[in-house]
Image: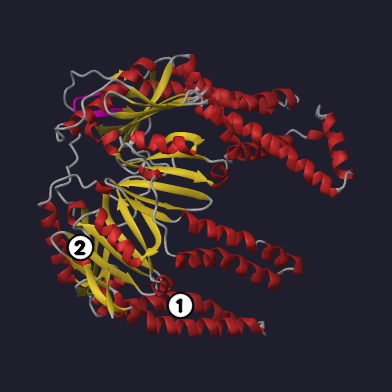
């Protein structure tokens, strides 16, 4: 005996596999900032209190777990799709968020590359609407697909009348 | 890249020199320093009466006053405005020349404010707001401070009517123009809600802070307040419990009086009308009068707000959800604290509905949501108790644990607030305990969806479904709704947007 349940389907496209490297780098940088001061204290201060060693070990274990698990988990979750009607994304890992923005309400389409992203040949496409609550972002596309997507979206928004509020 | 379908900004036209430039009203020269002085009166009195003729200080104050007057003169000489067919232009500034131009078709709100000084001389300041979200400290519109009240009223009608005409041309079956129609006005009985707002407490706290500041500055020991010594003596000798009780009593009485004063000063003469030109107009104020006009076509819904205390007294206030207005600012206020029934009545009058969407029966959220609300209210208290147990004496964490029942109550109240409904034209959602907000958002004003599911929400089969919009807060949440119910709600509210992304799956039952 089964019943039917309605749910959101996954968006069609995965992001570039290189995103795993990008997220790993982000995690490594973040945790280094937290770990290095602790290690400095441990190594250069005479007889540090015992809880400091515990804190450093806990931070280290968390850092390794997060750096290994988060990028892969994210890669399995992150997906996007652009239809003539709407832009549809799924992001996150522990917390996940689906965002849908109708093409008729799009105000701007931007592509952006941070320094790490440039190194890996990745781009972020940002789609803003008139809402003050923030844009729809597609992270981790390779350069060509990002440019192609931005062009497509711009062409479709051109074809839709209205002032998008 | 901009989407060019969005009407491109009109160019800054400096043409038509035939149109003459206006200066601000000359009386402003007197009014602006006067307003500044009115604000400084307590300080001046303090300085002259209690300052004991400290020449240096009096000299300083005189210097400040001279500077204020000079500044006023300068800004009068350097400020000019004119209204062309396309835009409102303002030139201002001496060292930094500013040229502001606001396209008339982008004007969404016109605020008239007259402080006491303005009113003595029959002047008003007029602020023209565009549909932009105005960030703190960044003025998206143009302010003319000040012009004569007649000129202000003329400008208000002129500017809003233009906005209206542009919109009407795209909407053939707009309702016919009618005369200004009153929707609500102040009932003196509403004053009973004043003590239920926190404004009184804030006012008392603020005054106390200022007084303490002066008391220190003015060296109280040799002042005229000999009575104060008796008070201090009594306080130091009386038992602690009595002192605290008396202190609380005094603060309470002062707060009640202050809140009544604040209510009267802010909302005296409150009237909400629908003007002939299709704008909603709120007029209020005892000393400083304010008139806020909102273009009705920019209205995307209303919000009924019930802060905890006000809710206990069955009161509420109503604000507008409109593009270009935040809901927290003063200008979106449609109804001051009043009976909750009145709040819902104003809501449906404003929206031209026969029944209030904010008052419709809401669908409750599943019981799992109660668990989440309670856990989220209780966890911080437990954390606090844990931290205190480690770092502080024993009574501290015990005191923290005593907060636990309140946390549970708060969680329960938050759960009780959760609810949603869908009417013909509105999506209604409610949440919050300390500030319970019921929002009715036009379904046509929804410009996107967000569905978020945290780890624990996924395990509980819940989701938070949020509608994004160009108006008010920008996004309104349906919190902790059953996942399927939430998705079907979103699908029904805006047809065809979510549909392509929904799928049906079998689930074992």
1 vs 2, front mark? 2
Mark 1 and mark 2 on one chain? no
Q: Residue at x 25, y 24 (%)?
A: B83
> On the rendered structure, is B196 left or right of A112?
right
Give the residue displayed 23% in from the left and 65% down from the top.
A88
Categorize mark 2 by other alpha carbons within 10 Å: few (<14), some (14-19), many (20+).
some
Instruction: Evaluate whether residue B169 shows in this view.
Output: yes
Looking at the figure, which quarter contains the C terminus of chain B? bottom left
Residue at 54%, 77% in the rendered image: A37
Checking the image for residue A31, the label placed there is: 1
Is mark 1 in CB contact (under 8 Å) with mark 2? no
| Number of numbered discs overlaid on the protein picture | 2
Query: Distance of mark 1 from mark 2, alpha carbons?
Result: 41 Å
Q: Chain of mark 1?
A: A
Read off the magenta span: B83-90
User: What residue sits right under mark 2 in the picture?
Assistant: B499
In the rendering, at what x and y percent does residue A94 appear? 39, 74
What residue lies at 64% left-to-right and 64% top-to-bottom? B404
Residue reaching furthest right? B237
Q: Position of residue B158 (x, y in %)?
A: 26, 22
The chain ID associated with circle 2 is B
């Amino acid at each position: 005996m089964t019943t039917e349940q309605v749910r959101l389907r996954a968006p069609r496209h995965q992001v570039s596999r290189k995103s795993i490297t990008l997220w790993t780098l982000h995690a490594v940088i973040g945790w280094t900032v937290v770990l290095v001061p602790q290690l400095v204290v441990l190594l250069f201060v005479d007889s540090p209190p015992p809880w400091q060693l515990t804190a450093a070990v806990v931070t280290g274990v968390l850092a390794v777990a997060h750096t290994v698990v988060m990028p892969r988990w994210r890669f399995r979750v992150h997906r996007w799709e652009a239809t003539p009607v709407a832009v549809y994304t799924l992001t996150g890992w522990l917390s996940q968020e689906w965002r849908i923005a109708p093409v008729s309400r799009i105000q701007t389409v931007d592509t952006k590359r941070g320094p790490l992203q440039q190194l890996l040949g990745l781009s972020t496409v940002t789609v803003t609407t008139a809402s003050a609550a923030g844009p729809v972002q597609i992270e981790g596309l390779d350069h060509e697909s990002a440019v192609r997507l931005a062009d497509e979206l711009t062409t479709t928004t051109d074809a839709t009348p209205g002032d998008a509020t | 890249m901009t989407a060019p379908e969005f009407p491109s900004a009109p160019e800054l036209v400096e043409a038509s020199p035939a149109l003459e430039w206006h200066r601000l009203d000359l009386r402003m020269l007197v009014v602006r320093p006067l307003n500044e002085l009115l604000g400084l009166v307590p300080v001046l009195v303090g300085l002259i009466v209690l300052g004991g003729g400290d020449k240096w200080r009096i000299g300083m104050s005189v210097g400040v006053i001279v500077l204020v007057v000079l500044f006023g003169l300068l800004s009068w000489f350097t400020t000019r405005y004119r209204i062309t067919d396309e835009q409102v232009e303002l030139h201002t500034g001496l060292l930094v020349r500013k040229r502001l131009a606001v396209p008339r078709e982008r004007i969404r709100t016109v605020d008239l404010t007259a402080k006491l000084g303005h009113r003595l001389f029959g002047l008003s300041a007029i602020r023209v707001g565009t549909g932009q979200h105005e960030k703190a400290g960044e003025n998206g519109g143009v302010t003319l401070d000040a012009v004569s009240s007649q000129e202000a009223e003329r400008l208000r009608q002129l500017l809003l009517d233009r906005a209206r005409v542009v919109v009407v041309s795209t909407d053939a079956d707009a309702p016919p123009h009618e005369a200004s129609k009153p929707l609500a006005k102040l009932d003196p009985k509403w004053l009973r809600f004043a003590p239920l707002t926190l404004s009184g407490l804030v006012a008392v706290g603020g005054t106390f802070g200022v007084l303490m500041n002066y008391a220190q500055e003015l060296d109280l020991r040799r002042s005229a307040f000999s009575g104060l010594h008796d008070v201090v003596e009594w306080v130091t000798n009386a038992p602690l419990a009595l002192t605290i009780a008396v202190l609380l009593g005094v603060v309470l009485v002062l707060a009640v009086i202050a809140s009544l004063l604040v209510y009267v000063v802010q909302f005296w003469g409150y009237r909400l009308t629908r003007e002939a030109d299709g704008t909603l107009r709120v007029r209020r104020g005892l000393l400083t009068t304010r008139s806020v006009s909102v273009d009705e076509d920019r209205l995307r819904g209303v919000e009924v707000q019930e802060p905890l205390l006000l809710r206990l007294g069955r009161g509420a206030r109503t604000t507008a959800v409109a593009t270009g207005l935040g809901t927290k600012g003063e200008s979106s206020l449609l109804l001051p604290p009043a009976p909750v029934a009145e709040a819902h009545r104003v809501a449906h009058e404003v929206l031209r509905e026969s029944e209030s969407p904010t008052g419709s029966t809401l669908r409750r959220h599943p019981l799992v949501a109660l668990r989440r609300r309670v856990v989220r209210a209780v966890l911080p208290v437990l954390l606090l108790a844990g931290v205190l147990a480690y770092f502080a004496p024993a009574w501290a964490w015990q005191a923290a644990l005593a907060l636990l029942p309140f946390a549970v109550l708060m969680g329960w109240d938050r759960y009780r607030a959760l609810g949603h409904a869908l009417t013909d034209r509105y999506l209604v959602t409610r949440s919050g305990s300390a500030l319970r907000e019921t929002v009715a958002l036009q379904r046509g004003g929804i410009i996107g969806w967000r569905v978020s599911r945290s780890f624990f929400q996924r395990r509980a089969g819940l989701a938070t479904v949020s509608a994004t919009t160009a108006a008010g807060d920008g996004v309104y949440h349906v919190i902790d709704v059953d996942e399927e119910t939430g998705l079907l709600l979103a699908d029904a509210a805006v047809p065809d947007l979510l549909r392509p992304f929904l799928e049906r799956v079998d689930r074992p039952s």
